[in-house]
Image (cartoon, rainbow, N blue to C red):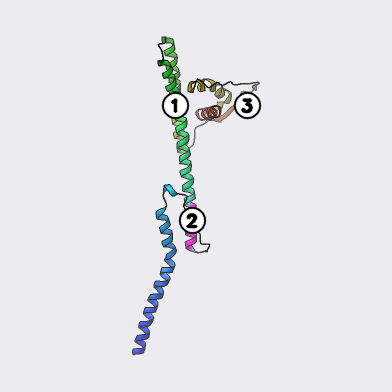
Amino acid sequence: KYTLFFAFLTGVVMSFLAGLFFSTLLLNPLKKITSVVKNISSNNIEERLPDNGIKDEWNELSITFNELLFRLQDSFEIQGRFISNASHELSTPLTSISNQIDVALQKARTNEDYLAVLQSVRSDTQHLSALTQQLLDIARTSRGGAIQTEPVRIDEVIMELPFALSKISSNYLVHTFFDELPDDEEQCTVNGNYELLFSAFKNIAEN
């Protein structure tokens, strides 16, 4: 009876210790994953979980989580580029408006001169408003939206560049050359967004 009781007690203790050992061994990778995940934020989104090379459930979890981090990192980078580009696009018409007002205030001018400045400022303001709406549309595309497009004449977009760039800086001098335009106007027409195409060509010319 004592032998059986001792054997039973010994077996319970050994089972408890073995269970504790194997559970600790089994959950140790999870603790490492949890420790790394707690330290990952937007400041170190490039951090990744270690890949131990063992084909088990924990390593599969690490790989899956790393793939999620890659997608999040891409989203952060796209968002950063969008904010940078949007700031540049919005600053251009604002700079143009500010320069025109500064020039108009340098000395007294005729009513016709002030009227011309106001008309030019209104044109820039309308462009700024349209550009802001297009940037919002671009932001919506990341959530499944679509940018509105329509037939746009590329030659008409390019012909606006000299005047638009001269308003940004008096040092800018732009010449456009059209040696030969096709008789079929559809060959000069693309399906796109006028404001975004104009901004793209303007950035190319300015740079």
Task: Give the residues in magenta.
Answer: 57-67
Task: Say whether disc 1 or disc 3 marks the residue closer to the N-terminus.
Answer: 1
Q: Secondary structure at mark 1?
A: helix
Coordinates of residue 66 in the picture (x, y in percent): 48, 54
Contact? badges 1 and 3 (CB < 8 Å):
no
Q: Which mark is residue 187?
A: 3
Q: Whole-Å distance between the Cαs marked 1 and 3?
A: 29 Å
Q: Which mark is residue 1?
A: none
In depth, the one of 116 and 187 nearer the eye is: 116
> Which of the two marks, 1 or 3, is nearer to us in this view?
1
Residue marked by disc 2: 64
> Which of the two marks, 3 or 2, is nearer to us in this view?
2
Residue marked by disc 1: 128
Residue at image x 39%, y 55%?
38
Contact? badges 3 and 2 (CB < 8 Å):
no
For label 3, count other residues whose C-alpha is less than 10 Å away and answer few (under 14), some (14-19) or many (20+).
Answer: few
